[in-house]
Amino acid sequence: MDAKKIRRYVPRDRNRHPPAYFPAYKTTVARSPRLPLISIRQSLTEVTGPDFSQLQLGPYDNDLILNFRHTGLPIGERIIVYGQVRDQYSKPVPNALVEIWQANAGGRYRHRNDNYLAPLDPNFGGVGRCVTDAQGWYRFRTIRPGPYPWPNGPNDWRPSHIHVSITGPAIATRLITQMYFEGDPLIPQCPIVRSVGCQDAVDSMTARLDMAMSMPMDCLAYRFDITLRGELQTYFES
Amino acid sequence: MTNKLLPETPSQTAGPYVHIGLALAAAGNPTRDLEIGHELAKPGAPGEHIVVTGRILDGTGHLVRDAFLEFWQADAEGRYDPVYDPEKPFNCFGRAATTFDQGEWLIKTVKPGRVAAPDGRLMAPHISVSVFARGINIHLQTRLYFEDEEAANAEDPVLNAIELAARRKTLIARREEGSDGPRYVFDIHLQGPEETVFFDF
């Protein structure tokens, strides 16, 4: 019998994640499976995933202040958003694709289905991406997004947030989350935030003001570290 | 020694505007030089070229028209080549969105080869599919298998891990003959009597 080295990932603790069915967020009611997920052993299909080390991105892809400028600079609070992508063992995750999208300073998305009253900003697209460096760091320059109302309860508002997608290193680590801003009073009121059950987990999605990284007379900085599932090397008999 | 792990960052819904970030053309916005799209295989890629398409239905039977999907599969030889490079004729990774009118997604790819399971047995050809959308708090993970691989499907360890045999058919794409080659149709039911099998791994 041979021993073979394989990669696997720490099981996902679904208690840290929101449940599929969360009636306070009404759209989940008809879009949540009713039957239990079926647990399967991780195979190559799950422990591999796209590697973005060879990706050639545009020079402004991670600069939302400049990547949609037409007549000038976008309106709003200029910020840096940065952080480290690491795994559950604190090991940095290099070459992960970090993609973000967000509303503009008025709370309006550049999307054909968004018809909120707040106007589009001709100089703001609201999309960015970058690949984490060898130590797992990512960095964006953007405008702080505004809160906006959404059709759920009679008067529900989304707190200011940035959608963050992390692809790689494995299908098992795939994650899309949202980043909130420290001190925003709308955070505890939002049904989407509240779908995450424990306060500690909500806090982990809340970026902290980081005066050290801010640029004097230019922009503030917020730090948002992201934790992906831990990678293990194990042996098994075949 | 106790090994205290950092907790994973929680998932949040990709929301109704996921397209502006991950499927720019669908949002009606200009695209960048490089976008990860629905063409996993270019015309020159080795293997049997196929189109895979489908719809997503919610628990009331309505189409989910604002979903975003990701696909991961082996090449025609059953190998995972992880390096994503738009210059290559084939990439194992692709993305698609359901259309706002017909609610259909579509990818162009090659039929994947067989990959070994952890125990050394061969799995049937399959594509890993992840579904993101407004109202989906954490992405749903499933697998697409092929109707015309009956013998391989019968011995696939993942299909066989589904205790209720009747539910296995929710993962089998049906084959149709299209004008330019085979076309596989895979409808995903989020809920209801035909609820698709979703996995945890």
Image (cartoon, rainbow, N blue to C red):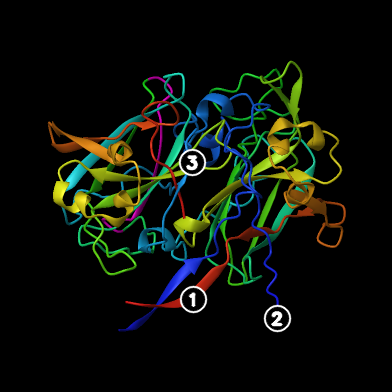
* Chain to which the residue tagged by mark 3 belongs: A
Cα distance, mark 3 to mark 1?
Answer: 29 Å
Does residue B191 show up?
A: yes
| Whether residue B69 is situated above or below residue A119 in the rendered picture | below
Residue assigned mark 1:
A233
Tell me, yes or no, whether the highlighted magenta stretch contains residue B42: no
Residue shown at the point (37%, 62%) measured from the top left = A43
Position of residue A131 in the picture relative to residue B141 (left or right):
right
Question: Mark 1 and 2 residues: CB-CB less than 8 Å, in contact?
Answer: no
Position of residue A104 in the picture relative to residue A110 (left or right):
right
The x, y position of residue A74, in whole percent, is 71, 37
In-front residue for pair A38/B53: A38
Q: Inspect the image, locate mark 1, and give the three-letter code of the amino acid beneath it.
A: Gln
Task: Classify mark 3: residues with Cα within 10 Å, few (<14), some (14-19) or many (20+).
Answer: few
In-front residue for pair A31/B39: A31
Which secondary structure, mark 2? loop
Which secondary structure, mark 1? strand
* Chain to which the residue tagged by mark 1 belongs: A
- The N terminus of chain A is located in which quarter? bottom left
Q: Classify residue B76 by image quadrant.
A: bottom left
Residue shown at the point (75%, 46%) measured from the top left = A198
* Chain to which the residue tagged by mark 2 belongs: B
Cα distance, mark 2 to mark 3?
Answer: 34 Å
The x, y position of residue A107, in whole percent, is 71, 29
User: Which residue lies most toward the top here?
Assistant: A154
Give the extent of the magenta segment.
B88-101
Residue assigned mark 3:
A36
| Whether residue B189 is situated above or below residue B62 in the rendered picture | below
Residue assigned mark 2:
B1
Q: Inspect the image, locate mark 2, and give the three-letter code of the amino acid beneath it.
A: Met
Position of residue B169 in the picture relative to residue A102 (left or right):
left
